[in-house]
Amino acid sequence: MVLSKTASESDVSIHSTFASRYVRNSLPRFRMPENSIPKEAAYQIINDELMLDGNPRLNLASFVTTWMEPECDKLIMDAVNKNYVDMDEYPVTTELQNRCVNMIAHLFNAPLEESAAAVGVGTVGSSEAIMLAGLAFKRKWQNKRKAEGKPFDKPNIVTGANVQVCWEKFARYFEVELKEVKLREGYYVMDPVKAVELVDDNTICVAAILGSTLNGEFEDVKLLNDLLLEKNKQTGWDTPIHVDAASGGFIAPFLYPELEWDFRLPLVKSINVSGHKYGLVYAGIGWVIWRSKEDLPEELIFHINYLGTDQPTFTLNFSKGSSQVIAQYYQLIRLGYEGYQNVMENCHENAMVLKEGLEKTGRFNIVSKDEGVPLVAFSLKDSSRHDEFEISEMLRRFGWIVPAYTMPADAQHITVLRVVIREDFSRTLAERLVLDIQKVLHELDTLPARVNAKLSAVENGKNGTVIMKTEMEKQREITDFWKKYVMERKSNRNKIC
């Protein structure tokens, strides 16, 4: 006689994960569930949903590192439970951060003696680094104005309209006016001449971008420094420069070592760089370096002792992981100057392969420059039937994530696609991307125009007269249509939890 029993619902050990009630039933999405579930089921449910994310390696929109060596991955996991702020408990991790600061400072030609300690700090990214640098400029400017008995309630920063959104955040959060130099067609970075014209006695600094997010171009920091030196001499001001080298800080020293953009220029007082971009570390690490101690007001540095010893701290947050700091040190000693140079040269060469492949199609204008961040920004020569947003949308069917976007004022009628070349983007992938873009173009050529059929190329004037729209007006109308379309798609996606 065979004995059998009915398994209770709680006896999950005999069930396949996908046959268990935890996977069969929908889980709460807005409130914490009342009961626990097995670890296997929790893992599988989350893992299944994450399969719907894009492939990070094919995300060509992002500058952020998506691949590291397995040895570094292991170091990261070994340190994932260390809180970096506990400096007394983890003194070696603190020492590694200080070594990184000194290595990067020397890379940026800080005026230091060989054994002198550099002034800088690790951050969670360039956004925090920029906030800290901006606060230092603001406080130093305020202190000077107070000492001179002058008003100190209307500080401003001069930037180009191409700056990353973190500069707008700094201006809004810390009540600093942002004076932007507008762009123009064919010139998509800050014009140093116009920037210096905007400088006044309330300007706490001029922010130059080494590697524009829009097209990867380096701004002319040397010319800006020379023009600002002359204006300071004429006015008696001492307006400084901050270099936002989030993307280009780990590129210029290796590809363009003769380019003067860093602390070799006397007005450059601070520089930020993203370790998680071309510093070749996973997301979550940035650095800000000051020229000297005099450029970082002492009153901004806090001293705490409730973790064991006196610890100076200048950050916007407190707790953060140690893993990325350790990973950055790994890359600096593992690759050295030679290794970083090889990686950057390879990225540049692959960018040129992609650029040449796109040019051979005869369908695109290249907006990016050969000198700068290794990326390719390009736009259609003829967008009367189909545009860049459609290409971006259709490339997703092949797995590629290639962003389409409009330029800032006063070049907002220009729409571009951008491909960022990272360390893990091989020549084979570059060639494959060109082939897939050609497939998309061929398919679009067989389709009727999606936008122009909806948007009239003419307007009715007074007394029934017909007024033809200019090419720029039509392009702006098409761009506005697609911006609205993309935002609606994003909004609808966000409604699905």
Image (tube, rainbow, N blue to C red):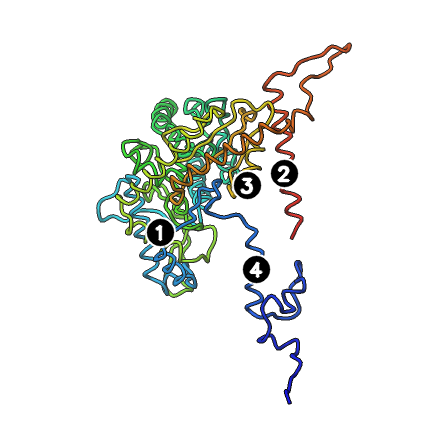
Residue 250 sits in quarter? top left
**Front one among 417 and 12:** 12
Instruction: Say which label, 2 or 4, has the lower sequence index.
Output: 4
* Along the viewing direction, whichever of 332 and 162 lies nearer the viewer: 332
Q: Taking 321 as reference, is 294 left or right?
A: left
As drawn, the label of residue 487 is: 2
Residue 467, percent across and down?
69, 13
Q: Are marks 3 and 4 in contact (CB under 8 Å)?
A: no
Mark 4 or 1, nearer chain start: 4
| Disc number lying in front (4 or 1) | 4
Q: Amino acid at mark 2?
A: Met
Residue reaching furthest to the bottom = 1
> 479 or 260, which lies in front?
479
Residue mark closest to the camera, 3 vs 4 = 3
| Residue 249 at x, y percent in the picture | 36, 39
> Element type at marker 3?
helix
Marks 4/1: CA distance?
A: 29 Å
CA distance separating discs 3 and 2: 17 Å
The circle on residue 405 is none
Dot 4 crowding, Cα within 10 Å, few <14, some 14–19, many 20+: few
Q: Report the label total.
A: 4
In the displayed image of the protein, which residue is found farthest to the left?
114
Please report whichever mark, 2 or 1, sits nearer to the chain's N-terminal start.
1
Of the image marks 3 and 1, the number of the one nearer the N terminus: 1
* Type of amino acid at the residue the image marks with label 1: Gln
Q: How far apart are the alpha carbons under marks 2 and 4?
A: 27 Å
| Residue behind mark 4 | 46
Q: Position of residue 168 (x, y in %)?
A: 52, 37
For discs 2 and 1, the disc positioned in front in the rendered view: 2
Residue on which disc 1 sits:
328
Residue 396, which numbered label?
3
Q: Compute the Cα span from label 3 to label 1.
A: 32 Å
